[in-house]
Amino acid sequence: MARAQSFRRFILSTIICIYLVIFAGGLVRVSGAGLGCPDWPKCFGRWIPPTSINQLPPDLDPAQFNITLAWIEYLNRLVGVIVGFLITATAIWSMAKFRQHQRIVFASVAAAVLVAFQGWYGSVVVSSGLHQTIVSAHYFLALLIAGIMIYIYVQAYYLDIENAKTQYPIPKDIRLWSMILFLLAFVQIVLGTQIRGTLERLVELSPLLGDSERLESVGLINHLHLALGLTIAAITFVFGLRVRKSKDSVPPLINFGAACAVILVSTQIILGLIFIVFGLVPQAQLFHLSVASLYLGMLILILSATFIKKEE
Amino acid sequence: MTSTSKHTITIIAIAAVVIILGLTASFVLTEAQGSRGDLEVLGTVPPFELTERSGLSFGSADMRGKINVVDFIFTSCEGPCPVMADNMSSLHKAFAGSSKVQFVSISVDPARDRLSVLQEYARRQGVTDSRWVFLRGEYDTIRWLSESGFKLAADDLPAMHSTKFVLVDDKGQIRGYYSGTEKASVNILKTHIKELVEDMQ
């Protein structure tokens, strides 16, 4: 049967690449390499970033040249371009082979348009001098693109299951709670980007402040982030047990998503503890935001898998 | 292959990917951190003696023991100078909590920039402390200091003065040049000042 299997594999690879780009983007933000290339799309006027300060064009300020930061920033652009091609290929593939499945066609075309916009928006991020709202919008757009691709994956998944609607009488409360968790996780990520932004602004305003003083200045929102994080963790654990209890009335995809969500949320707790004990370790920050992105993706997976289309 | 061993392989593969990503990221982040503190010594500020807006003398000896940001300005300049002054002012504010960081603006127009003019200029920048000094000296001294001391172009002073900010460490060594008119450059200067201050401690 498996008519969408290779299509699904291709989408899965694309999704993995999107998360690698999100990871690379996190690396850019955490290492502060966002302005590693002051121009766009080239880097110091070159398609391959300069390896020596002598290669800089005379009109660019040499103080801004840091080969490490330039390559970190450029890596994000390069993997981003690869993802752009993969999503475009997905859109072409769905128009060619899945024309009758409107959800797949619309979603993949939307993803292709958004990824093109995202590429261009990268130039806005750079020219804004890393304005916090713009940097965060760039990140949320990446999450949205990942979410759409996950949605397409789920649609393709159900193409290969006959009578999915009757085979999986998904309990209503599973949909409700995955929706609640999705919304909470979204709010949590917004809070996280706010904290990140405030910390960065503090570095700019008073560079000599230590980590703990900076965290203290962030204040209320930090406590809110912790409280909401613990709430989400608790609900996720209960949710995981709930899905397990009806594991035969939901498709394996939901079981997989719920198990991953539990693992990811546990990882976040460990990373949170690292922050509390060791301070803002950059490596932990990078994983903290990557795991959060994956967690949101898992909830999109579960949520969209609870909507099974009627057989035609 | 049984499904259990397939699962085990998947889990091992995921763990391997996570570990590789973690190590790569760790390496890259350490490199990025290290690349910032990598400030070569580009020269040494020669001994000089000028007059501060307060009328007291100020010389190279007064720069020792502090991290200094030096620029060349003149108070009636209307081109890039207001932007430079704004950027210098933002640095002055950013390091308000530290007596280890000092800002030094040297006038290239001694004919017009008398001490009273410099005092008024400082007031306009909101400077009420001695962390930011404004210096005046003979035209020839200033030209020599700009060209030979700080290695900055000074062909046609005052109009064609350099717009660079010069970073000078606590031993009187030049550690970097930054565009005084570009925010991105000034932000890099901020991180370099921080590095040098931390090195002092």
Image (cartoon, coloured by chain):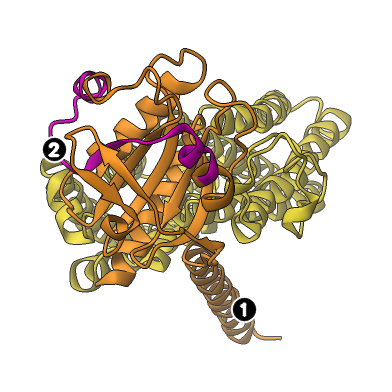
Q: Residues within 10 Å of mark 1 (few under 14, many from 20)?
A: few
**B82 lies above or below A229:** above
Chain to which the residue tagged by mark 1 belongs: B
Tag on residue B61? none
Q: Where residue A54 appears, x then y in whole percent?
A: 78, 54
Q: Quick check: is B128 in the magenta stretch?
A: yes
Whether residue A247 is visible here, answered yes or no, is no
Q: Is residue B168 above or below residue A116?
A: below
Q: A199 or B55, which is in the foreground?
A: B55
The magenta segment: B119-144
Instruction: Report the number of numbered marks.
Output: 2
Q: Is residue B32 left or right of residue A234?
A: right
In which quadrant of the rendered view does residue A96 lie? Answer: top right
Residue A282: x %, y % from top left:
39, 64
Q: Residue at x 48, y 57 (%)?
A: A31
Label ID, residue B129: 2
The colour with which the image depicts chain A is yellow
Residue type at mark 2? Asp
